[in-house]
Amino acid sequence: MIAFEVKDMTCGHCVSAITKALKSVDNHAGFTIDQARHLVMIESADADPKELRDAIADAGYSPVRVEEGTVKASAQANTCCGH
C-alpha cells in the first residue's frame, strides 16, 4: 500500500479531483480516500509512488508520503475502543 497525507484535501471536490488524478496514473489501482483523516491509500501493482505523488500535486494538492504502519496505528487510535 502507498499512502499519502493530504492536509489540504478538505471537501468532496478535493476527493473527486484526487480520484481523477490517481486514475490518470493507474486506472486499475484500488484506493481509499479518507477525507476526515486527510489520507489517500493506494493499492497499485504498476504505479510508482513518485508518479502518484506527482499526480496529486499536479491536481493542486500537497501530498506527504506516510508509512503503512503509521496509517494502521492511526486508524486504530480513531476507533471507539482502540481495536
Image: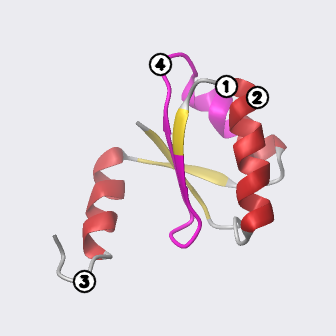
Of the two numbered discs 4 and 1 on the same chain, state the one appearing first in sequence: 1
Q: CA distance from mark 4 to mark 1?
A: 11 Å
Q: Secondary structure at mark 3?
A: loop
Would residue 27 be found to the left or right of residue 69 on screen?
right
Of the two numbered discs 1 and 3 on the same chain, state the one appearing first in sequence: 1
Which residue appears at 34% of the width and 46% of the height?
68
Is disc 1 in contact with disc 3, using a CB cutoff of under 8 Å? Answer: no
In the rendered view, tell whether residue 6 sits above or below residue 83: above
Is disc 2 in contact with disc 3, using a CB cutoff of under 8 Å? Answer: no
Q: CA distance from mark 4 to mark 2?
A: 15 Å
Q: Secondary structure at mark 1?
A: loop
Of the two numbered discs 4 and 3 on the same chain, state the one appearing first in sequence: 4
Mark 4 crowdedness (10 Å alpha carbons): few <14, some 14-19, many ≥20: few
Residue placed under numbered mark 2 in the picture? 24
Which of 56 and 22 lies nearest the eye of the viewer? 22
Residue placed under numbered mark 4 in the picture? 45
Is disc 4 in contact with disc 1, using a CB cutoff of under 8 Å? Answer: no
Q: CA distance from mark 1 to mark 3?
A: 35 Å
Is disc 2 in contact with disc 1, using a CB cutoff of under 8 Å? Answer: yes
The kind of residue on which mark 4 rests is Ala
In this picture, which residue range is highlighted in magenta? 32-53
Disc on res. 80 = 3
In the rendered view, tell whether residue 70 sits above or below residue 82: above
Mark 3 crowdedness (10 Å alpha carbons): few <14, some 14-19, many ≥20: few
Which residue appears at 79% of the width and 51% of the height?
17
Would residue 29 be found to the left or right of residue 22 on screen?
left
Of the two numbered discs 4 and 2 on the same chain, state the one appearing first in sequence: 2
The kind of residue on which mark 1 rests is Asn
Mark 2 crowdedness (10 Å alpha carbons): few <14, some 14-19, many ≥20: few
Q: Secondary structure at mark 2?
A: helix
Q: Position of residue 6 (x, y in %)?
A: 62, 59
Disc on res. 27 = 1
